[in-house]
Image (spheres, grey):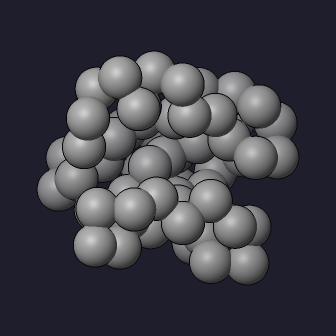
Amino acid sequence: MDPKLLDILACPLCKGPLKLSDDQHELICKADGLAYPIRDGIPVMLEGEARTLTVDERLDK
């Protein structure tokens, strides 16, 4: 994902920062505990499409 795009994207719920997952298939919002998918290089920034982070993911384990 383009680093410039990552800099301007924000969580649609809390407007907080997003982090690119290690496998680069999701954008993670730690504040809301959600992971938004990236499909075909396009972030899907819809709450209904996001998955809830596990406890370990929230704690960076």
- Total marks shown come to 0
Q: Tell which of 54 and 38 is nearer to you.
A: 38
Q: Is residue 22 left or right of residue 54?
A: left
Q: Tell which of 3 and 50 is nearer to you.
A: 3
Q: Quadrant of residue 6?
A: top left
The answer, for residue 9, to whether it is visible in the render is yes
Q: Which residue is rendered at x = 54% and y = 25% of the image?
A: 8
Q: Which residue is rendered at x = 64% and y = 34% of the image?
A: 10
Q: Which image quadrant: the C terminus?
A: top left
Q: From this view, report whether residue 19 is shown above or below residue 38.
A: above
Q: From this view, report whether residue 4 is shown above or below residue 54.
A: above
- Residue projecting furthest to the left: 23
The answer, for residue 54, to whether it is visible in the render is no
- Residue projecting furthest to the right: 13
Q: Quadrant of residue 2?
A: top left
Q: Which image quadrant: the N terminus?
A: top left
Q: From this view, report whether residue 21 is shown above or below residue 50.
A: above
Q: Where's residue 31, x and y in %?
A: 69, 35
Q: Where's residue 57, x and y in %?
A: 42, 51
Q: Tell which of 36 and 51 is nearer to you.
A: 36
Q: Quadrant of residue 4?
A: top left
Q: Is residue 53 left or right of residue 48?
A: left
